[in-house]
Image (cartoon, coloured by chain):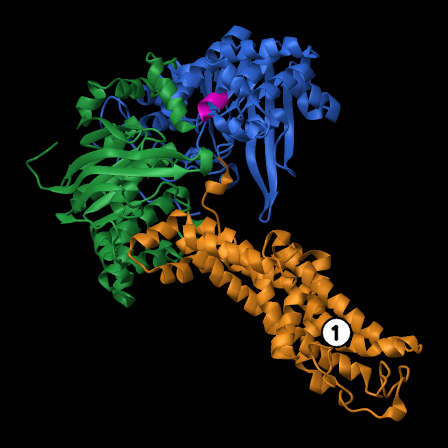
Chain colours: A orange, B green, C blue
Amino acid sequence: MSAETLARPAARRRGGDLAVWLGPLGIAAAVIIALITLAALFAPLIATHDPDIGSVVQRYQGPSAEHLLGTDQSGRDLFSRLLYGARTSLFGAAVVVLLAGGGGAVLALVAAWFGRNVDAFLGRVLDLLFAFPNLLLAILAVAVFGTGLAQVTIALAISYVPYTARVLRSVALRERRLAYVQAAELQGLSGLVVSLRHILPNIVPQILTGAAINFGYAMIDLAALSFLGLGVQPPTADWGLMVSQGKDSLLQGYPQQSMLAGTCIVVAVAAFSVIGERLGGRKAGGRA
Amino acid sequence: MSTTAENVIEISGLCKQFTTGRGRKRRTVRALDDVSLTVADGSCLAVVGESGSGKSTLARVLVGLERADAGEVVLAGRPVAQRPRRAERRARARDVQMVFQDPSGSLNRRRTVEAAIGEVLAAHHRVTGSDARRRIDDLLDQVGLRPAHARALPGELSGGQQQRVAIARALAAEPRVLVLDEAVAALDVSVQAQVLNLLAEIRRARRLTYLFITHDLSVVRQVSDEVVVMRRGQVVERGSTDQVLDHPRHPYTVLLRDSAPRPGWRPRLSINSDISSDTAEAEA
Amino acid sequence: MSANVLELDDVRLALPSRHGDRTLLRGVSLSLAPGEALGLVGESGSGKSMTLRTVLRTEPPGARVTGRVLLDGEDVRLLGAAALRRVRAERLTMISQNPRAALNPVLRISRYLVEGLCDARGESRDEATRRARDLLARVGIADVDRCMDAYPHQLSGGMLQRVVIAAAMASSPRLLLADEPTTALDVTTQSEVMAILDEQRREHGMAMLFVTHDLELASAVCDRIAVLYAGEIVEIGTPAQLHSAPRHPYTRLLLDSRPSLTAKTAALPVIPGRPIAAYEVEGGCAFSGRCPWVAPRCSEGEVALVHDAGRATRCLRADELTAELAGPAVSEPAGEPVQAGETEETA
């Protein structure tokens, strides 16, 4: 017996509420994500140099008016490379999250709708996938299909599916048992229609939360794969690859490339995980 | 039961078992144990019982949400397939609709009242567009809501209003039978009275047949012509409402009646301890 | 210093929400004599459970409570953490709707009871075990051995509620707080649990605050009943007084709108609209929006709870309406027939 059962005005979020809900840390994270996204989108306009062309004469320069953040071992402009690097990093992670979220949602809806044997079977398959570490799965994919961003991204997405599917399945099952789903079922609507029209919209919040949390992890994993030389191939600019390429110069006393790219990764991942937690905490859809 | 009028529901020998647990803890519960009953066209049959009596399972089998292990259901003269195809389910939905207990759970919280009712109209009568709008307003009016409520999300309505929408949605299919599964149990007393009156009025106006599942004998008296008392999957007593409530024959019916709070009532340990210990077990 | 076990004096409660503070209690005052049973009856949002929670100090986090809650003359709202624990352990006991939530699912009943006794009274294990068995037998549990050895999930809701009652009786507290203790139970089980609760309470001379939505149930086990609406008490009286001659329109309509077990009516008398919460009250009598006897002055400022010969009523027209409210049936008092499909107010 509480005010919960009373009629109340719509609980739709408004702008002012959004700021309160995010909190100072959340606002900072949202601003960072917005800046990175803008940088990636408008990289060709902002960049001062071509990211892939440099001259060996200008290698290892410190920050200057010409090169805002200095240059790398090939004399390429680091500022421009970081901007373009945001593109591959964000794009790769976005694809991973999209595929993993979509795949997880489909599996969750199928398991929830059919229940029983189908649910049990899917559970087993997911358990099997769980047994493989994400990176190992991606490395296996590279071994079979060759190196490259596309291969690595798809492999990583598949390895993320169990995490999203497991959480979404429990949410979808809860919805499945509610009377409104049964009321729709009673009308003779097909499982596909009921799942997409009724259950899916009600698990969207969990899908989004999982996506935001996984985004950070996907960036790290992609960076790690690029670092190992399995993902993005040189000369394309990528934060993970830049950390890797900077490791030789690090030993020669020029740490800026690795440091800058590494900082970008850390800041971006932190921002995404803050937003993910604001969206619903670790309860929903995140891995680990 | 009444044999003069045509029976719109005929159920015979219905059985349904549930198994829970695995291995040594595996247990079988007989939710329905050879249940037979008929409901005359235009009448209201109350099915009364406590938790574990099988009354809700009966409702779910009747509307097709659950499959019986054995027995036959004849709805509006047509035998109902136990493994229905979608077309058959759709046809059955035009014969029988259901209103659930939990008002908030029985509506999709992300779809407006209009969308909820419109979906049923489109599914069964291919009514869309401005025709649908008119029908929706009409249905809302019949359940005591205003056209403005059509745009509301369930979260913006009170429990009583949500239940009215659920009734309107059921009526949209223009069924002959309405199965009400504890449909007023979750409502406040003052709102419960409104919805009970509404249901009575709708039944009169549309000549509907009701199967009213409830645990509440006072509600039985108010709504039904005939009553079936269920306990542990079996029908223990049936008859006209007045006869069963005023002159119960089965000791369990007597116990049920004596347990209902009313003016001058005092709680007491049951006269028939055998029955009461059974009830406690059945819950476990 | 009063002789009352419990006294609530103008208790108000507001809960912060996204839409600003929401008032849930608008000044609840009541008193409970030793051994007396008082029913708090109301619909959703009436504040009956919240009133009980202010006594235990288990209101939701962030709630702002004003007013005094005197337990044996001592204000529990002012107690420190240690003193509060002692009060909860020794002088108060609570039975809630869901006994499963009160019991640790991985402990056997015997451990739950015996440890409770050892902790609370410093008894030896053998002594406590003997007493636990005795308590279970007293709440009508036939097979004490089986019950002591059982885990909570092996027992039915009715059995568990008996175990909780047995535990509540162990320390013979002065005051029992019961929050819809039988709402989740079947009617036959409800009857038994209430009978046991009633008997045990009388045996131990405990006072009881009994929260329920069921006026008939409260009438059967309570000495007096307070009817709540929108966060305040609208009427207090004995069950007999409320049934034969209710003085507040809401009480009368609440009694009428419940279908009767013995007689069918053509159409139930209904209260139009829905029960409102305290924060939705817009000055004047909270019930005026739904009251068939409403007069213009009803919406002109707050209505006081008027005490008169052991009863109390919060209605400006109580005196004029006495005869009408006690009459046989309320037949369309507003002049216009109350329709079945009466539209509820929109929020």
Residue B56 horizontal side relative to residue C194, left or right: left
- Crowd tier of the residue under label 1, counting other residues whose Cα lies within 10 Å: few below 14, some 14–19, many 20 or above: some
Q: Residue at 93%, 77% (x, y): give it.
A: A253
Residue sitting nearer the eye, A211 or A165: A165
Main secondary structure of the magenta stretch:
helix
Residue A66 horizontal side relative to residue B155, left or right: right
Q: Residue at 66%, 15% (x, y): give it.
A: C90
Residue A257: quadrant of the picture: bottom right
Q: Which residue is mark 1?
A: A228
Residue B115: quadrant of the picture: bottom left
Q: In x, y percent, where is residue A242?
A: 78, 78
Residue sitting nearer the eye, C273 or B114: B114
Q: Residue at 26%, 29% (x, y): give it.
A: B234
Task: Determine the residue located farthest toward the right in the rendered image.
Answer: A253
User: Is C160 part of what is drawn in magenta?
Assistant: yes
Q: In x, y percent, where is residue B56?
A: 32, 38
Magenta-colored span? C156-161
In the rendered view, tell whether residue A256 sits above or below residue C101: below
Q: In x, y percent, where is residue B151?
A: 39, 58
Q: Amino acid at mark 1?
A: Leu
In the rendered view, tell whether residue B249 sits above or below residue A83: above
Q: In x, y percent, where is residue C175?
A: 58, 15
In the rendered view, tell whether residue C249 sits above or below residue A185: above
Task: Determine the residue located farthest toward the left in the rendered image.
Answer: B4
Asked if one can make out residue B136 in the rendered structure from this viewpoint, the answer is yes
Residue B136: quadrant of the picture: bottom left
Give the quadrant of the N terminus of chain C. top right
User: Is C187 part of what is drawn in magenta?
Assistant: no
Residue sitting nearer the eye, A120 or C189: A120
Residue C244 horizontal side relative to residue A161, left or right: left
